[in-house]
Amino acid sequence: MRALVYHGRNDVRIDNVPDPKIEEAGDVIIKVTKTAICGSDLHLVDGLMPTMEEGDILGHEFMGEIVEVGSAVQKFKKGDRVVVPFTIACGHCQFCDDDLYSLCDNSNPNPDLSKASTGHSISGIFGYSHTLGGYSGGQAEYVRVPYADVGPIKVPDSLSDEQGLFLSDIFPTGYMAAENANIKPGDTVAIWGCGPVGQFTIKSAWMLGAGRVIAIDDVPERLDMAEKQGRAETIRTTNRMDVYEKLMEMTNGKGPDSCIDAVGAECHGDTMFGKVIDKTKEVLHAPMSRPYVLQQIMMSCKKAGTLSIPGVYIGMVNEVPFGAAMNKALQINMGQTHVQRYLKPLLAKIEAGEIDPSFVITHRLSLDDAPKAYETFKNKEDNCIKVVMTP
């Protein structure tokens, strides 16, 4: 089959690789019909995420048709059309029982690598390094999906692939980010980052009762989408003091009730230590995330406000004003998305017409175009916000 394969930093190619096979009785094999590039995929190709190996297949946002079913699978049959969560969960450990699927004890076959970076084993993730299981991803013609009775959900015939695809990650991620922000009716919510996750976070904040949504970025096409599709007020800069001062002006000096970091490790901004941090990362090849958004949020959020972090962070984050967060009594909620928890309720919202997730797509391409698509997406060329590919 054809698949997008990692060959080293900033080197991904379409290769012919062996077709996946059923390895465990709970597996299914899916023929991928749609797959997407996620912002966190850039952490892999940029070399920020450790334990990538040459030959790894990328991609954790995908859906398709089941073409082979393991002997223990009960929920699905050949021909079923499904969307697959990016987090892999066993369904029966303590954390899965508590609906904390991204913390699954059993789905990561490389627990020692995971413990080395986090102190504990966390769940496997498709196409996202050997620290997170070494699973082949879905930017391919076919993919093996383990624990099939726990993960995928059927997509009804009434919905297109493009409407169902983003249940795999960015819609649940945006919704959980808004839920973690403890939004009360009428609250002012500030969201850093207007990429795909940010766009769904904006939509979700309104669903959860926000009175105002303020979106912060410096990419014009993303801000335009936030205004037109998300009805958000916008701040069109990432300059540290400009953002703080504008937020104080917009909230009469109080600050937003909730602040959401929908950017993560490779954010852009200004800080007196920024060049030092980037140089250290370059010289030591250390997994070091940039602190700019966290700095702005911790200084800008209102006293006793809530900070929600759906953005992916890797390794260390230096120069974070933790004293400000502590003294202002900020509540901080974060984590990889427990996708399985949100599949049914968010699918119901799509079916009811409350949201059409395809609004975020700007580029529709063939899987063969994936290497170029990564460059376009990474460099923010051609007004690219979200790429969907067909194998």
Image: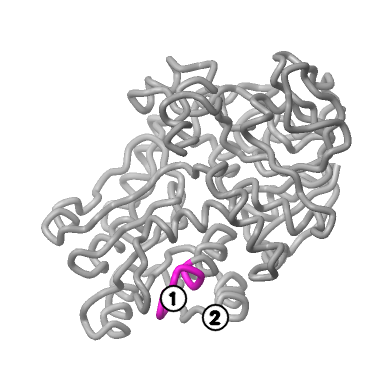
User: Label 1 amino acid?
Assistant: Val
Name the foreground residue: 108 vs 13.
108
Q: In which quarter of the image is the C terminus?
A: top right
| Residue located beneath label 2 in the image | 231
Name the foreground residue: 333 vs 228.
333
User: Is residue 371 in view from this perspective?
Assistant: no
Quadrant of the rendered structure where residue 243 is? bottom left
The residue positioned 77% from the left and 57% from the top of the image is 162
Q: Please provide percent x and percent y for residue 19.
A: 84, 21
Quadrant of the rendered structure where residue 107 is? top right
* Circles 1 and 2: CB atoms closer than 8 Å: yes
Label 1 sits on a secondary structure element that is strand
Magenta region includes residue 308: no
Magenta region includes residue 212: yes
In the image, residue 247 sits, relative to residue 50, either above or below, namely below
Quadrant of the rendered structure where residue 25 is? top right
Q: Please provide percent x and percent y for residue 368.
A: 85, 42
Crowdedness of circle 2 by 10 Å Cα count: few (<14), some, many (20+)?
Answer: some
